């Protein structure tokens, strides 16, 4: 396998202070980026800088501090707009994360549009955040959920999906990249087929945005969500993209300050987009720092990030395939940054605990994707998830850690 020697890995790693930490006396090997990514100095210092020099509540004050905080927040909105290539900054709604973004659409759009017998299509690959909000709204409206199956490799079965579509389908809500298996879903085809049936499409981009370049206009997707904390930004902040006309037609999700035009006890009118969906004081410092995270990944470039992570995933897959008694779950030809596996006769939690003693952080469990676990008849897996700062020698450390586990368990 040819390595990309131009990728500035040493400089990138130096940007992440936490990567020089030791865990149990060993060098940290952080392979849990799917759960949350670490933060570069540019993001960490932006958080301090906001609170030290440019903080006040936004969209409220005529005073200087309020104005510069408002400008910085709106600048971050434009960065998120460019990241997704949204046509218009009103289509970028700041939410707490992907979970809140999906709940917002399921609740607001769902309450206004779903009727008994209408159908919502999900897939087996979904994170619980893209299942439960739809179950809640289906229960409230009488809508019905249909589920696209996957094959033994974890591939989204597009032909089965096509069979589920009908004029009853009102919403297709699927992940762009599976957080449990890494499968990249053929979203262009998903959207094209949904359009033929007149359905809307929401993509859960939580596991895609840190790894691939996304263009919501080229995709012609109706709603797209992601979380800042997986994109090297702070937790507690994320983005919901929605087409302007759809968002305009949707009722507010939460009521409160900021989302109103005029309030009287007789009648309240609502603010324009995007503020109609941003009730209350937002996560000002987090939004501005998310802007810094977007600048950071753009400086490296998604072509370079994707190529580097693809290289890491290929190398890790090759190394694990050479080992005995390892089962990799999720072997789809199109995959991103995730390697889920089990070691024969060893519980994933034991694997995770032993790896941790060598300083290696992986996630073990169901990854908030229990239907995926059920599909493979397992309760849990070990998941190594890669980010832009990981290296081949960290994969070597993982392989050595797995060998130690195998030796301990005979
Ligand atoms: N997955 C993981 O370890 P929040 O918690 O709102 O930031 O993101 C939820 C979410 C939604 N969709 C996908 C595809 C996700 O991967 C996640 C978060 C983490 O895989 C934490 S459970």
Image (cartoon, rainbow, N blue to C red):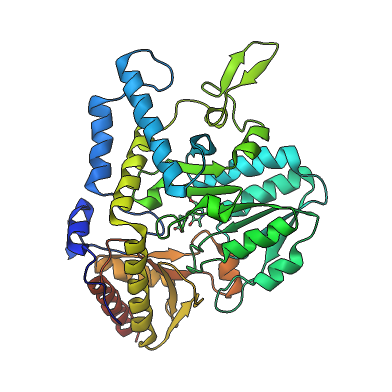
Toward the right, the furthest residue is 117
**Closest to the observer, 32 or 75:** 75
In this rendering, the answer to whether 64 lies above or below 22 is: above
In this rendering, the answer to whether 209 lies above or below 287 is: below
Task: Residue at 18%, 65% (x, y): give it.
Answer: 26
For residue 249, say whether it is visible: yes
In this rendering, the answer to whether 98 lies above or below 25 is: above
Picture quadrant of residue 106? top right
Q: Is residue 59 left or right of residue 405?
A: right
Give x and y (percent) for residue 277.
56, 32
Q: Is residue 230 left or right of residue 40?
A: right
Give x and y (percent) for residue 97.
48, 44
Picture quadrant of residue 31? bottom left
Task: Residue at 49%, 25% (x, y): give it.
Answer: 280
Task: Residue at 33%, 13% (x, y): give it.
Answer: 63
For residue 24, say whether it is visible: no
Total tally of numbered discs in the picture? 0
Give x and y (percent) for residue 99.
53, 47
Give x and y (percent) for residue 119.
76, 54
Q: Quadrant of the N terminus?
A: bottom left
Q: Is residue 232 left or right of residue 164?
A: left
Q: Quadrant of the C terminus?
A: bottom left
**Closest to the observer, 350 or 90:** 90
**Closest to the observer, 230 or 410:** 230
């Amino acid at each position: 396998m040819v390595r990309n020697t131009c990728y500035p890995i040493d400089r990138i790693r130096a940007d992440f202070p936490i990567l020089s930490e030791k865990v149990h006396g060993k060098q940290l090997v952080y392979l849990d980026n799917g759960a949350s990514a670490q933060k570069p100095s540019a993001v960490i210092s932006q958080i301090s800088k906001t609170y030290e020099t440019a903080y006040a509540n936004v969209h409220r004050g005529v005073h200087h501090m309020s104005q510069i905080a408002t400008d910085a927040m709106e600048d971050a909105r434009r960065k998120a707009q460019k990241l997704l290539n949204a046509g218009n900054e009103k289509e970028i709604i700041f939410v707490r994360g992907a979970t809140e973004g999906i709940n917002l659409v399921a609740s607001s759009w769902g309450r206004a549009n779903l009727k008994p017998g209408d159908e919502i299509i999900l897939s087996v690959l979904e994170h619980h955040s893209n299942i439960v909000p739809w179950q809640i709204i289906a229960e409230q409206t009488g809508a019905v959920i249909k589920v696209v199956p996957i094959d033994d490799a974890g591939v989204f079965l597009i032909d089965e999906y096509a069979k589920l579509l009908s004029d009853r389908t009102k919403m297709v809500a699927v992940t762009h990249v599976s957080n449990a298996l890494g499968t990249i879903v053929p979203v262009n085809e998903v959207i094209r087929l949904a359009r033929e049936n007149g359905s809307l499409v929401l993509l859960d981009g939580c596991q895609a945005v840190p790894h691939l370049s996304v263009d919501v206009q080229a995709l012609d997707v109706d709603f797209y969500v992601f979380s800042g904390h997986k994109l090297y930004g702070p937790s507690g902040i994320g983005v919901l993209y929605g087409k302007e006309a759809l968002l305009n037609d949707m009722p507010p999700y939460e009521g409160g300050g900021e989302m109103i035009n005029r309030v009287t006890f007789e009648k309240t009118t609502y603010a324009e987009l995007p503020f109609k969906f941003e009730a209350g004081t937002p996560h000002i410092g987090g939004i501005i720092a998310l802007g810094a995270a977007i600048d950071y990944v753009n400086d490296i470039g998604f072509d370079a990030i994707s190529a580097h992570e693809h290289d890491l995933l290929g190398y890790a897959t090759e190394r694990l395939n050479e080992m005995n008694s390892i089962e990799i779950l999720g072997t789809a030809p199109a995959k991103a940054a995730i390697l889920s596996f089990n070691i024969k006769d060893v519980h994933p939690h034991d694997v995770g605990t032993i790896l941790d003693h060598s300083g290696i952080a992986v996630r073990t469990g169901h990854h908030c994707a229990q239907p995926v676990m059920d599909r493979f008849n397992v309760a849990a897996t070990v998941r190594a998830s890669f980010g832009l700062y990981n290296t081949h020698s960290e994969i070597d450390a993982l392989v050595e850690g797995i060998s130690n586990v195998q030796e301990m368990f005979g």
